[in-house]
């Protein structure tokens, strides 16, 4: 029987396990990427593994998230990252070079290879026919040390694209359509493989917008074939030699096929406060807009920015709208500058930001109170922009441009102007001057550590009895932005005791203090949650910081993939209610008791939990592979790896 693309790549990289959906497999990792906000912890963990050098074909460390540098913390972290990269053979992309996913797509991604990155939008490189998966920093550190990456063998869903996009409709609208169909929950363990005649009409940066935001559906990754478009893109990047054709066999099998006719898609938006809250732009007509942000790793390619420049040419943005522009990479910025479009954008009133995550992660450009902010980024979770009462809508660059002109939500087709044609350069202006490659001849320098950097904390082995309190009960779709905010707090990523003070800050600001009190009383904390707990980012701080505060288990209706893996890596039990009715019975502050925990975890099977406050028992499941059981019993992956390396 024929194979799909995912099966082909996995077969070539399989190290352990069977190619059966739902079974745990280990795969060989060709490339890794990290960014600074998750990277400091990942490299501290890598250092703790005592590996002399990275063992991958390529590992790149990007500095793109924490580039605001208010206070010494960010700059110290940058120096740490630069020195650790030099010591262990890692390529460094300096602050100013661009957002990891955009730069990796341009300069490093390769068809048919595997990439594991400590950022949830790592699947962006799926646009090149690469199997690119987001993971927690510890899993990336293990991959750099030469360990396989473990995942559940995925179920592959084919998204069959037909037709061609109409003018004013673009790749962002395609992925918003996908989000409307699949939503942000219930897609764990799935890969979206794009195919069909419509694929050939989409360039690699357009495909990248689609694979990037597949992360919002919670899939393991998304992937496109590697074809003539891929070759043209690699050629434009002077990387023709990296091309490899990769196509699904004609008789390939899929768990499901979903058809999308590109010609039927309309301009769409994701309304507050979830990327799957989809509506047509037309239905939002005339809502006044205060801010428009163009950029992020989703929509900041040459084509995206030039389209907006052409729409705005000769006009000044509406007086009520603040226009934030953050190019995705230095390459994009240099090319729009060379071709004159930067001048047009500035003349129209663009406020030019650094080529970095910036507004997207909420560490700058927070909108005004009760603002309506239109953004081309990928997440509009409550409070992520830094303004709790702002309404953030996700839109295409075309819809963003229309609002810049009219000052209100406008279907770009109603501008009644000719849709601008953008000529993509056959060869981009390429300058890798901001990329530092490890110099083999240079003596290994000492690693720099500023006062903001502390060692990664470890958990204790799993006890036999857990006496705990439900320190917080939350609802469905709790994101990692709810669990541990980024934005202004992100500068403490390397300082766990400090960062932990902000766990659940935007949900219940007294959580951290309550959890500390419970911990000091010698008990554990338990989090109770609804469906799809841990959506969004890969930040393992959403596990490390709760662990630091004494959280030993999360009982939820369901978990998202990366977060569940992070909980296990740090020795926190991800437990699922056997009966969802039990979620309704349990209350915050209830005292729970779980006995024979080690025994039951080791043997497998459901765990009984006694609710001592209300006098009843209920069952949870905690399905773990043999590898995960070992990690949980040891109190986290660092305990095992640490032991293994000391034994050598
Ligand atoms: C995000 O978009 O939420 C981030 C910031 O890029 C995160 C990583 C992080 O929290 O550092 C992600 O997507 O994984
Ligand atoms: Fe950066 Fe935003 Fe992309 Fe995350 S989603 S990597 S914060 S640009």
Image (cartoon, grey):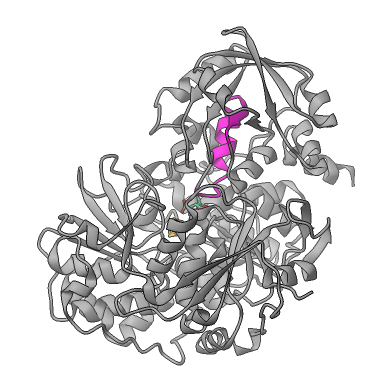
- What range of the chain is rendered magenta? 536-557
- On the image, the x and y values in percent for residue 36 come to 52, 55
- Residue at image location 73% in from the left, 68% down from the top: 7
Q: Quick one: which residue is furthest to the right in this view?
A: 648
Question: In front here: 369 or 433?
Answer: 369
**Front in this rendered view, residue 300 or 176:** 176
**Residue 39 spot, x, y in % from top left:** 57, 53
User: Can residue 194 be spotted in the picture?
Assistant: yes
Q: Quadrant of ligand 2?
A: bottom left
Residue at 27 percent across and 84 percent down: it is: 420
Q: Camera-side residue: 27 or 284? A: 284
- At x 12%, y 72%, the residue is 316
Percent across and percent down for residue 337 are 31, 82
Q: Is residue 537 magenta?
A: yes
In percent of width and height, residue 311 lies at: 22, 78
Above or below: residue 124 compared with residue 502: below
Describe residue 469's horizontal placement relative to residue 208 as left or right: right
What residue is at 34 percent from the left and 63 percent from the top?
Answer: 376
Residue 51 shows up from this direction: no
Q: Quadrant of residue 592?
A: top right
Which quarter of the image is occupied by the N terminus? bottom right
Does 465 sit above or below residue 234? above
Q: Is residue 346 magenta?
A: no
> Tag count in the figure?
0
Identity of the residue furthest to the left in this view: 319
């Amino acid at each position: 029987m024929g194979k799909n693309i995912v099966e082909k790549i996995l077969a070539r990289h399989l190290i352990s396990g069977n190619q059966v959906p739902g079974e745990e497999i280990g795969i060989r990792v060709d490339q890794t990427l990290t960014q600074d906000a998750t990277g400091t912890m990942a490299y501290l963990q890598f250092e703790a593994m005592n590996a002399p050098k990275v063992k991958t074909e390529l590992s790149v460390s990007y500095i793109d998230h924490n580039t605001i540098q208010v206070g010494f913390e960010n700059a110290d972290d940058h120096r740490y990252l630069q020195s650790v990269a030099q010591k262990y053979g890692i390529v460094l992309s300096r602050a100013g070079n661009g957002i990891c996913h955009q730069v990796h797509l341009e300069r490093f991604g390769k068809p048919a290879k595997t990439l594991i990155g400590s950022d949830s939008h790592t699947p962006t490189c799926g646009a090149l026919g690469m199997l690119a998966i987001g993971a927690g920093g510890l899993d990336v550190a293990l991959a750099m040390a030469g360990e396989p990456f473990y995942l559940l063998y995925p179920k592959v869903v084919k998204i069959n694209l037909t037709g061609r996009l109409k003018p004013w409709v673009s790749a962002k609208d395609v992925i918003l359509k996908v989000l409307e169909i699949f939503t942000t929950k219930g897609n764990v363990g799935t890969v979206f493989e794009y195919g069909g005649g419509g694929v050939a009409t989409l360039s690699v940066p357009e495909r990248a917008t689609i694979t990037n935001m597949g992360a919002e559906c919670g899939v393991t990754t998304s992937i496109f074939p590697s074809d003539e478009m891929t070759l043209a893109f690699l050629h434009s990047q002077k990387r023709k030699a990296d091309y490899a054709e990769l196509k699904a066999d004609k008789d390939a099998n899929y768990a499901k096929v979903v058809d999308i006719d590109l010609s039927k898609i309309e301009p769409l938006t994701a309304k507050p406060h979830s990327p799957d809250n989809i509506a047509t732009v037309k239905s939002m007509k005339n809502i006044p807009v205060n801010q428009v942000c163009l950029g992020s790793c989703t929509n900041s390619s040459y084509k995206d920015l030039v389209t907006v420049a052409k729409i705005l040419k000769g006009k000044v943005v509406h007086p009520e709208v603040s226009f934030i522009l953050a190019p995705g990479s230095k390459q994009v910025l240099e090319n729009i500058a060379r071709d004159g479009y930067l001048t047009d954008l500035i003349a129209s009133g663009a406020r030019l930001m650094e080529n970095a995550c910036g507004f997207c992660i909420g560490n700058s450009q927070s909108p005004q109170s009760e603002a309506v902010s239109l953004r081309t980024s990928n997440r509009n979770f409550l409070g992520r922009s830094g303004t709790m009462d702002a309404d953030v809508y996700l839109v295409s660059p075309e819809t963003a441009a229309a609002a810049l002109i009219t000052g209100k939500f406008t279907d770009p087709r109603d501008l009644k102007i000719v849709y601008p044609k953008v000529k993509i350069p056959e060869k981009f202006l390429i300058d890798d001057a901001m990329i530092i490659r490890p110099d083999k001849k240079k003596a290994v320098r000492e690693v720099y550590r500023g006062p903001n950097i502390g060692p990664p904390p470890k958990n204790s082995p799993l006890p036999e009895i857990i006496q705990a309190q439900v320190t917080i009960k939350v609802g469905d779709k709790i994101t990692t932005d709810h669990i541990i905010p980024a934005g202004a707090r992100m500068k403490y990523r390397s300082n766990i005791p400090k960062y932990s003070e902000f766990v659940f800050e935007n949900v219940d600001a007294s959580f951290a203090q309550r959890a500390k009190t419970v911990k000091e009383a010698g008990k554990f904390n338990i989090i109770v949650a609804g469906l799809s707990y841990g959506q969004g980012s890969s930040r393992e701080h959403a596990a490390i910081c709760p662990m630091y505060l004494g959280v030993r288990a999360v009982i939820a209706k369901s978990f998202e993939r990366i977060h569940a893996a992070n909980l296990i890596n740090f020795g926190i039990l991800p437990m699922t209610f056997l009966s969802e009715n039990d979620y309704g019975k349990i209350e915050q502050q209830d005292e729970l008791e779980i006995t024979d925990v080690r025994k039951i975890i080791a043997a497998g099977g459901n765990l009984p939990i006694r609710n001592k406050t209300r006098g009843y028992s209920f069952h949870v499941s905690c399905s773990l592979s043999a590898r995960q059981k070992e990690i949980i019993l040891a109190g986290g992956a660092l305990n095992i790896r640490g032991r293994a390396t000391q034994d050598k």
